[in-house]
Amino acid sequence: MTAALETLPPPTTVAAPASWRRALRRVLRNPLSAGGLVVVVVTLAAAALADLLAPYPYDLTNFDATLQPPSLAHWFGTDELGRDQLSRVLHGLRVSVAVGVLSVGLSLLIGVPLGLLAGFYRLLDPVISRLTDTLLAFPFLVLAVGLAAILGPSLTTATIALGIGGVPLIIRVARSETLRLRELDFVAAAVADGAGDLQLMRRHILPNAVNALLVQATVSVPAAIIGEAVLSFLGLGVRPPIPSLGVMIASAQPLFRDGPWLAVIPGLAIVLLTLALNLFGDGLRDALDPRESR
Amino acid sequence: MGRYLLRRLVESAVTLVLATVVVFAGVRALPGDPARTLAGEEADPVAIAAIRRRYGFDQPLPVQYYRYLENLAQGEMGRSLRTGLPVTDTIRDALPVTVQLAVFSMVVAVLIGVGAGVIAAVRRRSAAEWGANTIALLGLSIPNFWLGLMAILVFAIAFPVLPASGFVSVFENPVESFRHLLMPALVLGSGLAAVVMRQTRSAMLESLSADYVRTARAKGLSNAQVVLSHALRNSLIVVITIVGLQLGALISGAVVTEQIFVLPGFGKLTIDAVFTRDYPMIQGVVLVTAAAYIAINLLVDLLYSVIDPRIRVGGAAL
Amino acid sequence: MPSVSFMLRTVAVLAVSGTLISTTACGPIGSDGDGDGPAPGGTIRPGGELRVALAEEPDLLDPTLARTLVGRIVFVSICEKLYDVDAELNLVPQLAAELPEISEDGLTMTIPVREGVTFADGTPLDAEAVKVSLDRHQELEGSARAAELTSVDSVEVVDEMTVAISLNAPFAPLTAVLADRSGMIMSPTALAEKGEDFGTDPVCVGPFRFSDRVAQDRIEVVKDPNYYDAENVYLDQVTYRIIADATTRFNNLRSGDVEVLERTAPTDVAALESDPDLQLISSESLGYQGITINIGNADGITQPPGPLPDEFASPLSESPLVRQALELSLDREAINQAVFLGQFAPACGPISPASPLSSDAAQTCAEHDPAAAQDLLAQAGVEVPVRIELMIGTDAQARRLGEAIQAQAAEGGFEIELNPTEFSAALDQADQGRFQSFQIGWSGRVDPDGNIASFLTTQAPLNTAGYRNPEADQLIEAARASSDLAERRDLYGQLHAVVREDNPIIYLYRQKNLTGVAGTVAGVEVYGDGLVRLAHAGFVETE
């Protein structure tokens, strides 16, 4: 599961929240990550405006125009039920982005508090670490298939499965950041001033941990997008007739010979989006790292 | 050292037990009566009840769990509900396939990743660095099932040079094994290659700017010597760590790859077991996966602690 | 800006796809075979290993416990039965010497056992051995055959080579039942030795005998010298490989990694037919695929049918007119074209036209007419669109089918919401009556009773629709009891009319058994039952 591939410890020397504008400028100076940002924004816009941009409704079937190769009428061709592929790709992108962002959001929601607690309280640490380990040791797809069986396959189920799958990583990042920041001077100063635990976490640790979490998020979102595609490919994703890029590729598999564009184009869409996100994420990480002097 | 080892062992044991309890309960929480599913087309109440009795599904959960542990202690993981073959035998036949695939993928990933990482670190701000960087990122951005389909399209259908499916063990026929595993390994290793590349690059950058390297350069050692003997060696430690940790992810990712390339491996076994509610098989598979993951983690931790004594003391462990 | 390497890669992929599109052959649509592949001009040479690709992994290879169709495909090579079918689906004797003699009152069936037959382990076949197997099928706990043998009271050994079966009620389909797994005779020596583990190393009578099995991968069977017709068996070995993905199966056939391919995907037929090195064997299956509608399954199949709870009640469950409207709004031809590229056949009832018990009356069908559908809805006085939930499978083909149904039903005034549900969970829900409609099929049995009784008789084990119609019950009962073919044909025709009034199941299509065979192989036969028969298959002599 590619989500788990990013078990990297974050660079331990990520800077304290430098001025955001400075970081952004650094990102934009790098043509690759700037390009990534542009593609991401354009794709997000296209996905958000899918209803307006799509030339046809995504579920409009046309049994007289099935398996048409790309043409002027249908820029991306049609599938075996005569549905316009361009429209389906646009809506599919929307699904991908939604699941990607929401699932990472869920991971953060669950993982950050747990990670903070683990880093803060010596007693809770082993408990939370054991839970994290158990979750990591559990094969992700068994979890996903199990959830799909209980809740029924749908967008929500896929989001929950991916969200839960991403929790261990977030816990690790949050915990490691908490442990690191705890030792720093400004925290000691705050303690001396009489700050309570909750205040410490909320006002001092968390804001400084945001950078590392943000970097992790920019890596987790593309992984989640691919994760959604895998789940849909296996039949555990959205309900038909809502298109998902993974489902489109799965349906296209047996029709390879008759309509290779049906498998190629949705895949390229996923690659484009995730590559852009990864490039941008890379640039962001470099920009936030004080060692880099581009 | 001894205390650390003991502590880690206990932690691992706890995690393992937790995993078995979770899967045992979880699998029985799934909707879908396994007796009904097993009955398939010949489903009538009498047959279903008989199946239930035969496999002990009608016993209370703790009893079932106890029986399971009892059998486990004797090395018995039961028989597949579907094929009737022993779970241990089936897993034993499927594991080498996935292990060979995983090892091959790791080799591919390390070769590509380390190569790209070294280039990126050494030739800063050049086209080569951007190229290497992007190719590595592509590995992370391409869903491996799609990559597999495209690879089959090109290398097995359009220009038939490689077989589209099937598995040959490297111990049986190395050449054929290579041909059958090349595409799957490339596909599966592409994501890992990206991770390795990034880690290599960042580790190399760190060591290239370290004092002892500058000293070596000042002493007159050539660039290549510096790179190869000092910086690379240190970076490899990190790489090995990462690769060890990624084994679990690789096995997960192998599921789809195995489906597409028809490799009768562990990943495919897992998925099929869950879809058919093959309880004993699911339990066996999860147990083995968890055990492997925990064992590897333990090994990596120990390796790390041997290499870097600071870690042994605990503290801000990752 | 995406990097140069990225763009080059994109161009390369598109170029390759472009090449592929233009080289796609447009072959003719498949034609109906008579069950045999075209005979290549050449004799079959002895020897060789044939590799067959199966679509699924068989379950336990124990005739008493086995439940999968693919299991039957393996059995046909290693476990012969008392009776079998021929290419026209008529019953013929196999391990029996002749067709059974049925007494006047229909309560005794006498079966002569074939002479001179030995099991693969050398044990001779006699009436005693037949009794042992039949008893096991009935009595073993968890037997999958017990349900179809409920009419059997006892099995007696009359003399060394004759068996008499006593029935508790006349049951015409019994011979057909004995032409399936219930009629498979297992070696009593092996049974005594292995008992419950028989399935891990089965021993019966067959052109081949079981040799080895590797889970998830393959099953190997080798030629049996003890077979009574061994001199007409050419192959040394058959290896059944399990390849779940249809595209991969086909690729393997094309590349020569397997020689026979069961369940070719409809999407691969054109390519198969246009390839001069491959042959297609096609026969119409005995089963069907359709939509089961919950009419009266309120509390589960073990309870009597009744009105549905609010959660599942709908105009569809309450009014036959609405169900007829749904049937009229579905264009079976178009579905066949769009989803299966025209390779399957529309079906309007449970009886396959290939069955000897089919008749014109059993094949009547409604014309696709969405306007008439809307009229019926108006007549029934229901609010349009009618909202229905349809439970479907989670695989890609199930989705496609579901979406096609959805699109067409919309024209007739129905709004269908698709509910992909995993198979296990779906079976559960269907049994409990927790569904409105369910896309499900049946693999089919030689005797139409096997396609009808369990589904349409009141409170029958597979009657998930909760259908209760005394008239239908009577017709089914009568058709079972009569041994007169003409009479049975007539009764099934009447039943068809009754069922089409009520539509507890809307039959949609019937699959074809599409078997791909390499050009180097001859003698492979596939009849309507879908079993790949290899007894006389072999490699063609090359000059």
Image (cartoon, rainbow, N blue to C red):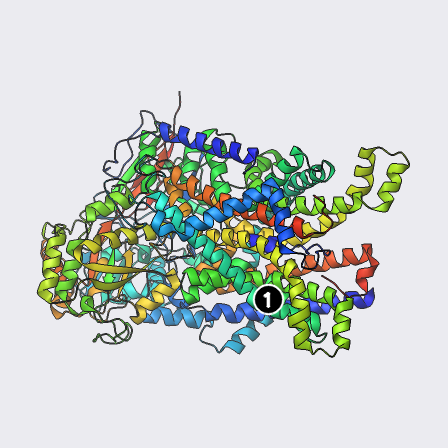
Asked if one can make out residue A130 in the rendered structure from this viewpoint, the answer is: no
- The residue at which mark 1 appears reads as A111
Q: Is residue C394 left or right of residue C433?
A: right
Under mark 1, the amino acid is Gly
Q: Nearer the viewer, residue C46 or C131?
A: C46
How many numbered marks does the figure carry? 1
Quadrant in the picture for residue C461: bottom left
Residue C132 in the image, given as x and y percentages of width and height: 36, 62
Residue C173 image offset from top left, x and y in percent = 21, 58
Residue A20 vs residue A83, the one in the foreground? A20
| Residue C324 visible in the shown view | yes
In-image side of C84 versus B191 (left or right): left
Q: For the C terminus of chain B, which image quadrant? A: bottom right
Nearer to me, C174 or C328: C328
> Which of the image's four quarters has the N terminus of chain B?
bottom right
SS at mark 1 in the image: helix
Circle 1 chain: A
Residue occupying the point 77% across, 42% down:
B232
In the rendering, at what x and y percent does residue C532 appear? 34, 43
